Amino acid sequence: MALRGLAASGPSSRGPLDEAVAAAEERGAPAVVVAAGGTPEDDEEDEGRGRGLLRWDGFSAWLHCVCVVGFDLELGQAVEVRPGRTLPSAPRPGPLAGAAPAERMARESAGPDPGCRASGRGRPPLRQSGRAAVHWQFPWEDRGLRLGKDPAYFYGYVYFRQVRDKSLKRGYFQKSLVLISKLPYIHFFHTVLKQIAPEYFEKSEPYLEAACNDVDRWPAPVPGKTLHLPIMGVVMKVRIPTCHDKPGTTQIAQLTQQADTHISVILPTVHEVDLFRCFCPVFLHSQMLWELVLLGEPLVVMAPSPSESSETVLALVNCISPLKYFSDFRPYFTIHDSEFKEYTTRTQAPPSVILGVTNPFFAKTLQHWPHIIRIGDLKPAGEIPKQVKVKKLKNLKTLDSKPGVYTSYKPYLSRDEEIIKQLQKGVQQKRPSEAQSVILRRYFLELTQSFIIPLERYVASLMPLQKSISPWKSPPQLRQFLPEEFMKTLEKTGPQLTSRIKGDWIGLYRHFLKSPNFDGWFKTRRKEMTQKLEALHLEALCEEDLLLWTQKHTEVETVDLVLKLKNKLLQADREHLPVKPDTMEKLRTHIDAIILALPEDLQGILLKTGMT
């Protein structure tokens, strides 16, 4: 059953849900969305919180909102909503373009899996725009993976239920529970849904409200922390990943001398998918797909259900980890998405994006895309589907096309037969899917590292020497990245040092340097190195006898120095520069000593002067 469109109901306007979400965002509270019709709750402070947080601050650290989406025969997807605070009740269905982001996300992600009677999941990132764009501040940097909240996207996690009901016109009760978050913790939120969704459909709104209250009591998801998260009688033990974690490894000690008797669920990962299950139909071509994702090529995954579409797209994005995929990706893309016309037009080349689709309509409208993967039903663990072949795009029919990878792309690298034999042997020996995923993830990791290490080595050489940093001059600039200069380094320090794979590595690098992934990666590295130069400049300032310097200069120059040093401290704090705490304290001591050496009238002014 395809995702049905919304019925038009007049011109686009700011409806009650828009008002509700806007009001919630203005005061920093989540739009906790449940079925309409309940009485407003008091906005009491949570007893014994002891964390200095307002009501729903804890909830907002994990979720943006929770939605219940019904499937109406006449209206299509209808969001049944009543926010967690005293806000208006359910909205009238309206055009998708005029809906608030939360409502649009819920509608777009709540499409059912064909024939699925338990759960269907979709995770489409939804770009924010206009007044609904909200940005959070976080105490950590996202340098390699999408670990923290992404200010540009929402992620929707869906549990779809379909039960036969002859009293309804369609003959089925159909409803979805949707969690909307800015955290890409795929496995974690799936687990949460499995815990609360079945009970919600039995016990309705009060149960969901209680679950939201449990989430509100959770500690913040700080990277590197192991947390115990209770929800409706179940305690989940999770570790929040950091950008330094090695992909495919878990930092949670699952076997301890003293078992945690109160722990119900231990999650070894919060964000990784079952890689081998997703690549299973195409693992013969996994290296070619790795190249396509690395180069940011436009790619479409046509799958029979939202869950299979979503998981396959996320597996593709994760296959180049720890390199971050900087282009757009839509695990479950529908005809209702605002970029539908942009992505289906033939008047311009397809953008750098990975789309996951299920609607057969896309077989025609996306036929001009250069790389298309058609997959059948993903098999349960222990079963292996028939391997699809690489086929030419001209063989892609509008309907009834067989599964396959439809592309004219010729890989730069020769296929690694060893990893294929290893995975095939695992299938023959009925090796668990988890173990196969570890093997495949390690292979992708080593391949990505072999590719990125020469770039890291060259970029590190662009860093000025530490001896060139003078406390009395601005920090030196990084040298320019010169592609041809980099290419010359590959002869002696290229990927052949760490990878057994042969092929046109030079051609692959040339293509990569023109891709969004290189642009995003290099901007991140340049920012990190610039911050390192600023930190070294601060350290150089601390090593100088600044008080002696002021004795040789005028009061005007001394005041100027104090103001600049104060701004340096502010910059270090604002940009989270990699400066040691004792360096910061030493610089504050220098500032205080200089101020005390000035006349009293200037002391009073400078002590009151803030850092601008």
Image (cartoon, rainbow, N blue to C red):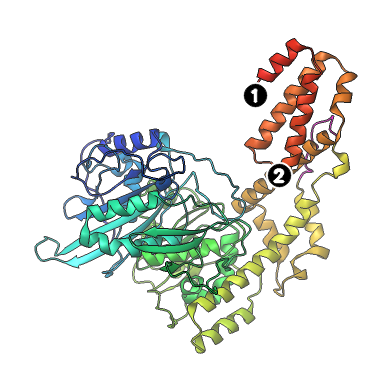
Image location (x, y in percent) of residue 286: 56, 72
Instruction: Give the mark, 2 or 1, whose residue is nearer the N terminus.
Output: 2
Q: Is residue 469 magenta?
A: no
Residue 2, quarter of the rendered image: bottom left
Residue 268 placement, left or right of 19: right
Query: Which stretch did the figure color magenta?
Result: 470-480
- By secondary structure, the bulk of the magenta-drawn segment is best described as loop
Q: Quadrant of the N terminus?
A: bottom left
Residue 547, can we see it? yes
Residue picked out by circle 1: 612
Placement of 367 over or under 220, stated as above or below: below
Q: Are marks 2 and 1 in contact (CB under 8 Å)?
A: no
- Label 2 residue SS: loop
Of residue 132 and residue 489, the one placed in the foreground of this image is 132
- Label 1 residue SS: loop
Residue drawn at (68%, 36%) of the image: 572
